[in-house]
Image (tube, rainbow, N blue to C red):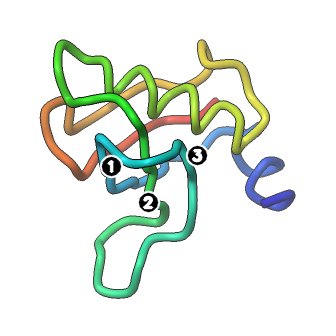
Amino acid sequence: MAADRQAGASGRSVRVRVTPRARRTEVRPAPKGVPAEFQVLVTVPPEDGKANKAVIAALSGAFGVAPSRIRLLRGAKARDKLFRID
């Protein structure tokens, strides 16, 4: 992920597939056949934006950037989301 941290620091769009209500929070490469770069597992349910906030926190840790530098561009209520990491 070190290369991803450098790319994330300069700004890029990241496609993710979210799995809410997982056993643990984790960012990992997406499985084959999934139209996303990463699969993000979060422990919270997809209610009232809680899962989106948890995904931002998980991406923040994985890419080594502040959560304020991550924006949700598309997919607020979908499993497949597009984020911008500046």
Q: Are marks 2 and 3 in contact (CB under 8 Å)?
A: no
Disc 1: which residue: 18
The numbered mark at residue 58 is none
Q: Position of residue 54 (x, y in %)?
A: 45, 26
Quadrant in which the C terminus appears: top right
> In the displayed structure, would residue 35 be above or below residue 24?
below
Quadrant in which the N terminus appears: bottom right
* Label 2 vs 3, first from the N-terminus: 3
Residue at image point 47% right, 66% down: 37
Disc 2: which residue: 39
Residue at image point 37% right, 65% down: 36
Q: Position of residue 66 (x, y in %)?
A: 71, 19
Kind of residue at badge 2: Gln
Residue nearer the viewer, 51 or 68: 51
* Label 1 vs 3, first from the N-terminus: 3
Q: Position of residue 41 (x, y in %)?
A: 43, 49
Q: Are marks 2 and 1 in contact (CB under 8 Å)?
A: yes
Kind of residue at badge 1: Val
Callout 3: helix, strand or loop?
A: strand
The numbered mark at residue 12 is 3
> In the displayed structure, would residue 30 be above or below residue 72?
below
Q: Is residue 61 left or right of residue 18?
A: right
Q: CA distance from mark 2 to mark 1?
A: 6 Å
Q: Is residue 74 left or right of residue 78?
A: right
Please identify the residue farthest to the bottom as the structure is shown: 32
